Image: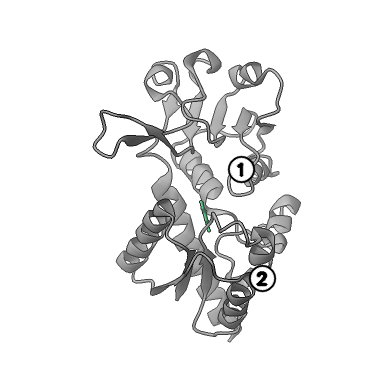
Amino acid sequence: MLVFIRMGEDPASRVYVGMKEKTAAQLGIESQTIVFPEATAESVLLERLRSLNSDSQTHGILVQAPLPKHISETIVYRTVAPQKDVDGFHPENVGKLMLGDLSGFVPCTPAGVHELLRRSGIEIPGTRAVVLGRGNIVGKPMTAILLQKAPDANSTVTLCHSRTLNIESHCQAADILIAAIGVPEFVKASMVKPGAVVIDVGVNRIPDPTAKKGSRLVGDVAFDEVQPIAGKITPNPGGVGPMTIAMLMRNTVEAASRMAQQS
Ligand code: GUN
């Protein structure tokens, strides 16, 4: 059983949790979604997490981010039992990844990007990778994955962020450029080395009076101008999203099988 927790009615979170539920059902993974009103006290959420931690029928727990402002993500992710932390956000799992101990859970989006690179036959060792964005969900763990001492990693990684000087020149040197910075169409053609692999993780909603909703989604990469230069590129929307979900399912199966072995 995979338990999703959603706080409030953030439209994007509803969509993301809905997609995860659907994939779980397709794979025969039982799931349940708990929705708390936006104003729910942190202590109520923590209490629920503790009871799920001790429930032998619950194998994975995912608290969808972003959380309301009065709730501390740090405290919430520390409260999920590390062995049920299919998001890989608990400090124990984060620490294991940093130490190169692959017995923990790895965050789903960067793990999905890594899997995509591997399965696309991209030789990662020796490459220069540039990660744009220092978030805990994508940027930081992505960096940790690519610099692992392992035959499918061993990249030289630069992590750039909003305060990086000469960000363009870092990008221009990248063999692999991963954008998770949250700025619509930030990566322009002039920033990309010919033949580079460009992975767009950004999802940004921008106003568009010609669209039915009055807005549309764009990535962190100006896809139309970068595509002719890049060796390989993923668009957004329509890119890495399903890989995130696939990794979540993989983590959930792993969590359940580890629990079964221990009982
Ligand atoms: N919000 C955006 N990405 C994620 C994710 O991978 N896990 C959770 N829990 N929330 C998210």
The local secondary structure at tag 2 comes to: helix
Is residue 23 shown left or right of residue 3? Answer: left
Q: Position of residue 16 (x, y in %)?
A: 40, 55
The local secondary structure at tag 1 comes to: helix
| Mark 2 residue type | Thr
Q: Position of residue 225 (x, y in %)?
A: 40, 17
Discs 1/2, front: 2
Residue at 61% in and 33% down: 131
| Residue farthest top in this picture | 190
Q: Give the camera-side residue of 34 and 151.
A: 34
Residue 235 appears in the rendering: no
Vertical relation: 187 (above or below) 7:
above
Residue at 50% in and 15% down: 194
Tag shown at residue 79: 2
Residue 173 appears in the rendering: yes
Is residue 257 shown left or right of residue 21? Answer: right
Residue located beneath label 1 in the image: 142
Between the residue at mark 1 and the residue at mark 2, the CA separation in whole angstroms equals: 23 Å
